[in-house]
Image (spheres, rainbow, N blue to C red):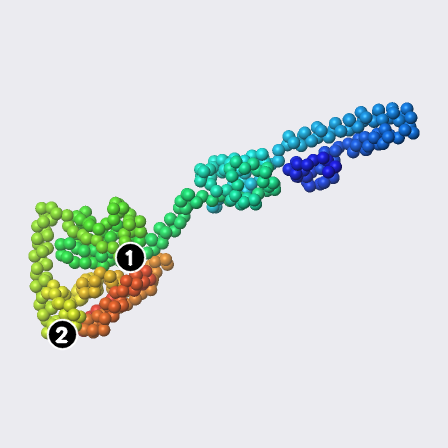
Amino acid sequence: ACTGIENIDEAITLLEQNNWDLVAAINGVIPQENGILQSEYGGETLQGPAYGPTGHSTAASSTPSSSSAFRHVVPSRQIVERQPRMLDFRVEYRDRNVEVVLEDSSTVGEIKHILENELQIPASKMLLKGWKTGDVDDSTILKTLHLPKNNSLYVLTPDLPPPSSSHSGALQESLNQNFMLIVTHREVQREYNLNFSGSSTIQEVKRNVYDLTSIPVRHQLWEGWPPSATDDSMTLAVSGLTFPCHRLTVGRRSSPVQTREQSEEQCTDVHMVSDSDGDDFEDATEFGVDDGEMFGVASSALRKSPMKNAENEGDALLQFTAEFSSRYGDCHPVYFIGSLEAAFQEAFYGKARDRKLLAIYLHHDDSVLTNVFCSQMLCAESIVSYLSQNFITWAWDMTKEANRAR
């Protein structure tokens, strides 16, 4: 009241300039306190007639003294009004903090324009939050918000896509997943169920198929790869394969030389089928029970007894997997192709992030309960998915005495 300042912003500015010292702030506005007192005394002498002529001269002399005292007040207030009040803003956006300093005569939109240059985000896409008074418009003048000197705000961008870190996390998760590829060899109508990690490349898949089909990579003709799988160096995680199972077909590219090779291969297959027919007949006489009678399906002349006449465990498991797939369908556990020792190495001695538990399935083809277990439980989609993600599954057929001895 003694300073005559009614504007609260001007009063706060004076206090901040004087480190919130009230006395110093008042003295800054009224630097000559004696002049004010003299003006008051001069007013009293005008009312007191006891001084006579002297009093008149005193009043006359006190009048310029009073006016000179108040002349100091006007320039002082003019100087204060020329000094703008500066506001500090600490603005947070995701993992960044931006410091903004502006005059209180600026608008909210000016803060956004500064942030636009710092964050490389269009001002129209920003939502500036954290105001004590609630949401404000871009045209709002900061002075009207009566803000303290230091302020904390944050930026939201709901119309912009999330940062790439989330995409990286999803990609890393896909790299750690296992994909089961059901590969059909077109020429011989044979299926292979192959298990690959998401970090494996398409080139690695084709090389493994070469080992199984003897079709060189350059002569392989594929069907079923997603349109995004355009490069053999691409990992399965980013190739667009269906998880957890994806079906592919491979054949040999046709050429005059390869046509002759294919005809020879078909002749070889005919001899193999005839041998297989004899095996099936011998098996039928040995057990006295037909698979069709036991499982309610018709026996096929091309069906081989799983793992019979296999030279090694890998070939035996390939035969078993093919027979298992033809009997119970494509949705079944991904069996590890290789010896039991190799399965141990795959499960327990790889990289720490790739290690899994080892599941061993022992199959007995003469048991009706085996058929019920496989069709109702083991080949259920939930069981197949769980085993694929958490286990290396190794299978062995215990039907034959020779297989039990091995």
Identity, as a three-letter code, of the amino acid under mark 2: Val
What residue appears at the point 15 percent right and 57 percent down from the top-left corner? 189
Between disc 1 and disc 2, whose residue precedes? 1
Q: Which mark is residue 197?
A: none
Quarter of the image holding residue 103?
top right
Secondary structure beneath label 2: loop
- Expressed as whole percent of the image width and height from the top left, the position of residue 181 reads 24, 56
What residue appears at the point 17 percent right and 66 percent down from the top-left corner? 306
Label 1 crowd bin: few (<14), some (14–19), many (20+), radius 10 Å:
some
Real-space Cα separation, disc 1 to disc 2, in angstroms: 36 Å
Quick check: 87 above or below 249? above
What residue appears at the point 78 percent right and 33 percent down from the top-left corner? 33
- Expressed as whole percent of the image width and height from the top left, the position of residue 82 reads 64, 30
Residue 306 in view of the camera: yes
Pick the front one: 293 or 60: 60
Quarter of the image holding residue 301?
bottom left
| Residue 182 appears left or right of 78 | left
Secondary structure beneath label 1: loop
| Residue 294 appears left or right of 67 | left
What residue appears at the point 21 percent right and 65 percent down from the top-left corner? 328
Residue on which disc 2 sits: 289
Identity, as a three-letter code, of the amino acid under mark 1: Pro
Proximity of marks 1 and 2: CB atoms separated by less than 8 Å: no
Image quadrant for the N terminus?
top right
Residue on which disc 1 sits: 244
Quick check: 381 above or below 136? below
Label 2 crowd bin: few (<14), some (14–19), many (20+), radius 10 Å:
few
